[in-house]
Amino acid sequence: MAEDKKDKKDFKNKPKFNPNKQAQEKHDAGPKEDINFIVRVANVDLNGTKPIFMAITKIKGIGLRTAKSIGTVYEKETGKSSVEKIGKIMEEDVRKLEKIVQQPQEYGIPGWSVNRRRDFVTGTDRHLITSDLDFALRQDIQRLSEIKTYRGFRHTWGLPVRGQSTKSTHRGKGGVVGVTKKDVKAAAAPAAAAAAKPAPAKGKGK
């Protein structure tokens, strides 16, 4: 009986398992990596703990497919793997990666992979990123509005452009359609006031 009480007391005094504490101790005990946690490419801060091809997807205008193509070109140009953490690569490799990101077609990336084919002004295939992509989009919408196309009008009105139904969706876009409760109350107010006003009493004739 005394041994059972002792075992229970020892069990209560036993420190609780804390996985976070053990992981932190293991991390502190291990060798620390020489890594840059923020890497700047094309004026965008990238997460240095991610692989190269995944980190550059944070740049606006670069999706996963284009990122993998850029990673393949990076491997050919530098001889280093594109799955390496971007925070571990040297500064000259970062500059090389930035050149590939900004001018992918000069490094053999095919035209069908770029995001602006047959540009309206130049007629060439281009790949735009960050603010250049936003500027080109604004210019396209402005041009459609100036030449008074259907798509331009729909953009101006804030309505869907590609033939979507607007009966049940996109209700918050464009002008007000139908009658609102406020309009109904405003129209009914004069009639209600007239009905509430007492009729004038008829005077007796002499």
Image: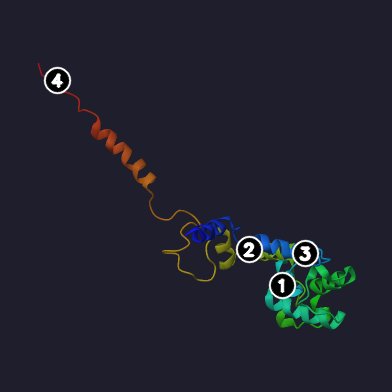
Front tag of 4 and 2: 2
Q: Tell me whether circle 3 and circle 4 mark residues in contact (CB < 8 Å).
A: no
Q: Which mark is residue 203?
A: 4
Instruction: Tell me how far mark 4 sits from mark 1, CA to CA.
Output: 92 Å
Q: Nearer the viewer, residue 56 or 42?
A: 56
Tell me the crowding category of disc 4: few under 14, some 14 to 19, or many 20 or more residues within 10 angstroms, Cα based: few
Task: Determine whether, in the image, residue 14 is placed left or right of residue 28.
Answer: left
Residue 118 visible in the snapshot:
no
Sequence-first tag of 1 and 3:
3
Tell me the crowding category of disc 1: few under 14, some 14 to 19, or many 20 or more residues within 10 angstroms, Cα based: some
SS class, disc 1: helix
Type of amino acid under label 1: Met
Q: Tell me whether circle 4 and circle 2 mark residues in contact (CB < 8 Å).
A: no
Front tag of 1 and 2: 2
Q: Quadrant of residue 147?
A: bottom right
Q: Which mark is residue 29?
A: 3
Mark 2 highlights which residue? 19
Instruction: Tell me how far mark 1 sits from mark 3, CA to CA.
Output: 29 Å
Type of amino acid under label 3: Ala
Q: Nearer the viewer, residue 185 or 96?
A: 96
Instruction: Tell me how far mark 1 sits from mark 2, CA to CA.
Output: 29 Å
